[in-house]
Amino acid sequence: MSKKILVVDDECDICEILSFNLQNEGYEVTTALSAEDALKKLTPEHNLILLDVMMGGMSGFRLAERLRREGNNTPIIFLTAKDTENDMLTGFSVGADDYISKPFSLKEVSARVKAVLKRTPEEVAEVKENVLTIDELTIDTLAKEAKIGETVLQLTKTEFEILHLLASNPSRVYSRRQMIDNIWQDTPYITERTVDVHITRLRKKLGDKSYYISNRTGFGYKFNQSEP
């Protein structure tokens, strides 16, 4: 079955040329001229989103952040003329899987698309009802319990929530600020240093599986399924 790609760009010419070339490579392509239109056209069957950053109305960054917040983990490659380090940091922090600067070559786009779609099934978290399973880790959201194999981890409420947040989106890097917004949203005056302290304690409790959580310097934290 061919992979399905959603191309989102407010320039018709870019949508048309990307659609034409990706279809020639065997992909099924849907196009949207705005983030708002993309929300209407995006389906669970889409395997990838090629997303422009600078658009009228909702920006690509805001769309990506909304999708990740809603639990949508469809891989995203940003297409943008903004290529500063801060822009890239923003892109990855809101859940991007890759970042292509305009103007781009079609060969580059093709190579990046293939690389992102090359993920193996083992890299995707298996979710059954209220249980999340990745590698040897099992998280039961009803029982509020996390286990490695048959060993129950003695986690605090905050540590459990951090582990669940990261494991639920294994391809995403969360900035400290995003983690605070997700986990401490009702608690004022939480600093980014607080996140680091909880991560350190959580990794210690994970023992020889501490590699499950890694720090991307300058970006934040992410979940690793296998040891680097």
Image (cartoon, rainbow, N blue to C red):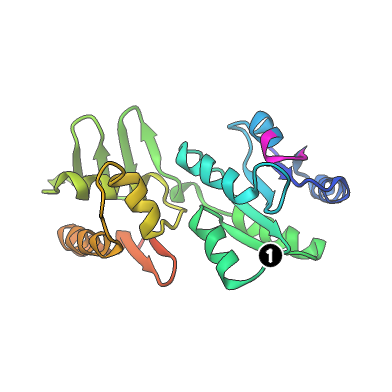
The part of the chain drawn in magenta is 32-36
Residue 7, compared with residue 89, is above or below; it is above
- Foreground residue, 13 or 106? 13
| Picture mark count | 1
Q: Is residue 146 above or below residue 189?
A: above
Residue 173 as seen in the image, left or right of residue 81: left
The quadrant of the rendering that contains the C terminus is: bottom left
Q: Quadrant of residue 223?
A: bottom left
Looking at the image, can residue 26 be seen? Answer: yes
8 vs 177, nearest the viewer = 177
Q: Position of residue 49 (x, y in %)?
A: 65, 46
Residue 118 occupies quadrant: bottom right
Q: Position of residue 173 (x, y in %)?
A: 44, 58
Q: Residue at x 23, y 29 (%)?
A: 142
Where is the N terminus found, in terms of image quarters?
top right
Image location (x, y in percent) of residue 24: 85, 48
The percent coordinates of residue 68 (x first, y second) are 49, 43
Q: Quadrant of residue 205?
A: bottom left
Does the segment drawn in magenta span residue 77?
A: no
- Note whether residue 223 is visible: no
Residue highlighted by disc 1: 82
Say whether residue 46 is left or right of residue 9. left
Say what secondary structure mark 1 lies in.
loop
Q: Is residue 201 left or right of residue 77?
A: left
227 or 18: nearer the viewer: 18
Residue shown at 79% from the left, 64% from the top: 107
* Kind of residue at disc 1: Lys
How many neighbours does mark 1 have within 10 angstroms: few (below 14), some (14-19), or many (20 or more)? Answer: some
Residue located 47% across and 36% down the image: 70
